[in-house]
Amino acid sequence: MWSFALKRAGTTAVTLVAASVMIFAFIHVVPGDPIYVLLGDTATPDQIDALRHQLGLDQPIILQYLTWAGHVLEGDLGRSIFFQAPVTSVIADGAETSILLATMTMIWVALIGVPVGVIAAVRHGTWLDQGLSGAAMLMASIPTFWVGLYLILIFAARLGWFPSSGYPSIFEGGVINLRYLVLPSLALAAPNAALILRLTRASMLDVSREDYVRTARAKGIRPWQVVRRHILRNALLAVVSAFGFTFAALLSEAVVTETVFALPGIGRLVVQSILRRDYPVIQGVILVIVVAYLLINLLVDLSYRVLDPRVELQ
Amino acid sequence: MLTVRDLTVSSGSATEPVDIVAGVSFGVAKGEILGLVGESGCGKSMTSLAIMGLLPQPGPRVRAGRVELDGRDVTQLQPWQRVEAGHGRMAMIFQEPMTSLNPVRRIGDQIVEAVRVHDDVSAAAARARELLELVRMPDPEMQLAAYPHQLSGGQRQRVMIAIALACRPQVLIADEPTTALDVTIQVQILGLLRELCGRLEMAILFITHDMGVIAQLADRVAVMYAGRIVETAAVDAVFGSPRHHYTRGLMDCMPSRNAGARRLPTVSGQPPAPGTIRAGCVFAPRCGAAREQCHVMTLSRVEVSRGHEVLCAFPLNGGEPA
C-alpha cells in the first residue's frame, strides 16, 4: 500500500513538471501579447515597456518559468493580467460552476446510461433494445448546443420551470441556485449518457458470454439474479474508467454548453483567457485541470482495487 | 435416473434445420458413470448443454426428443425452471475451471449462492464448508474467504464440484472436467468423482475425448460420432471387443506402454460437418470396411449382445469383421 502511494506520488510529480513546462512553452509560442490587450493600440512605447517590466515579461523565459514554478510551490498561481485579481480566486469561481455542473451531469449519466444500458443488454436483439440503442445513437450525434437551445426553448422560455442562463453561486443564494445547472447538465448528459449506455450494453453482452455466467445459470438461480450478481459488477469494471474520463473532460471541455447557458465555468475561462493572452490564468487553469485528471485517474485506479480483487496495488 | 430419448439439437432455421446432435438416446443409472466419448466437434458438449438446459442463446435449440430426470420430463427446461418445477437435482461441471468461477466474488459466496437455491438461508454457510470438506479441499475454512484467482486449477475444479453438489444432485454432468488440468491433479479429480458417485448415489454423465479416462473411470461407454451415438456398452465389453469400426479406430489411436516407438495409427479423414450429412452410415466415408450399401442404407441400432448396442450394418465380431 505504502509503496503504491510513493510510486504514485512520484509519477504524479513527474507528470506535473512535464505538463507545466509544456504549458509554459506553448503559451509563449502562440503569437500575440497581453500588453496590447491591456493597453490597446494607443499606448506609447514607454508605457508598454513599463508594464512589460512590471509584469516580469521582459525577463528570459527560463527565468519566468522558474519564478512562476517557485510561486506555484508556495500555492501562489500569480495574478491575472486581465482581472487584476489572484489567479487562485479567478479559478475558484470557475471551478465551483464546473465541478457542480460536471457532478450533476454525471448523476444524470449514471441514472440514465447504466440502467438503460443494462435493460438494452438483457433484452438484446428485441425491438426494445433496437429502440434504445437507436435513441442513444441519435443522442450521441446531436450537438450539445442544439440540445441546449431546445431545452431552453421548452423548459425555460415556454414552461418557465428552470432559468435559462447564468449561475449565481450557491454560497450566496443557497442550494436553490442548483436549478440554474439543471438544463445545462441535461444538455451535457445527453451525449455522455448515450456513450455510457452503449458501453454498458456492450460490456454486459461480453460478460454474459463468460464461463462463470454459465456456472451461475447452472446453479438454478433466476435470470435477473444472474444479471445482478454475476454480469453487472463485472460489466461495470469496464464502465468505471469511462466514468472517470468523462467527468474529467466535463470539468474542462464544456465550453460550448457553458457559452450557450452563459455559465462562468472553467472551459469558458480557458478560452477567454487565451483570447486575452492572460498567461497567468491560462497556466493556472491548465495546471489545475492536469491535477484534476491525475486525481480522477487515481480515484479510478483505487476504485478498481475495491471492485476487482485481482487488482493489486503495485 | 437420467434418460435421454432421440435428443436432436439443431441450428439453422426452423424450415432448414442443421442437426448438430441427431437422435441421441441413452440412460444413466443411479451410482453409475456413463462415459460419453468422441472427437471434438462430434456434438458431445452440445448434448450435455441441451440436457442441462444451458444451450447458448441465441444459438442451437432442442428440436426433438425428451430428457427425463428420475422419470420426470425436464426437456427444454433451464436450471432455474427445473428448480421452480421441483426437479432441480441435476448439476454440471465444466472444462475450464480457470474461467468458470466469478473472479470478483469470494469462493464462499459462490457456494452459498448455490446452496440457497435449495436449502434455507440460515445453515448455508455451514453447508458451504461441509461441501468443501466433501470435495477434499485442504483448509476449507480459509478457502471460503478466498477469491478464485488465489486458487490453483485443481482447487478451482474442486470448488466447481462443491457448487454442483450443493443441490444434492441425482445427476451430475461433467463436461471434460479434467482436460485442462495436470495429469496428477486429473487423477485426483477422477478419483474424487468416482468416490462421490458411489457415496452420494449419483448418476454421472462424463464427457471426454480421452479413451484412457473412460477406461479408468466409467462403468459404461457411449461412443459418439457426427452427432450420433454409434456404440453403447459396458466399458469391459467395448475395450474387450469393440463392435463399431469407429470405436475400434479410436482404440487403435491410444498409445499403449508396449507399443514402443511405433508410429500411432490414426483414423484417416475428417468427421463430416453438420449439414453435409446425407443418406447412409455417417462413418462410411472413413470406414475401412465400408461396403456399397453402407453409403445408402438407413441404419438402426442393433443389440449385438446384452446391453451392447451398435449403429452399424456390419459390426465387428471379436475385433474382426463379421
Image (cartoon, rainbow, N blue to C red):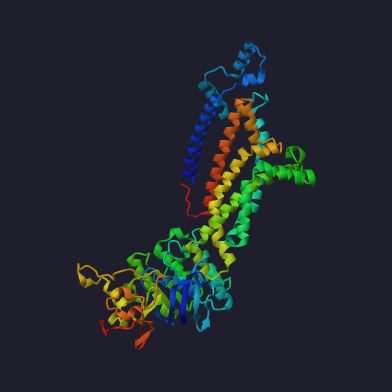
- x, y percent for residue A64: 54, 22
Residue A40 in view: yes
Count of numbered circles in the view: 0
Residue at horizontal 51%, vertical 64%? A213
Quadrant of the drawing holding the C terminus of chain B? bottom left
Q: Is residue A56 above or below residue B239?
A: above
Quarter residue A279 falls in: top right
Q: Residue furthest bottom?
A: B306
Residue at horizontal 56%, vertical 36%? A290
A163 vs B299, left or right, is right
Near-viewer residue (A170 or B226): B226
Near-viewer residue (B322 or A17): B322
Near-viewer residue (A258 or A266): A258
- x, y percent for residue A18: 49, 32
- x, y percent for residue A273: 63, 28
- x, y percent for residue A204: 55, 58
Q: Is residue A189 above or below residue B162?
A: above
Near-viewer residue (A58 or B289): B289
Residue B168 in view: no
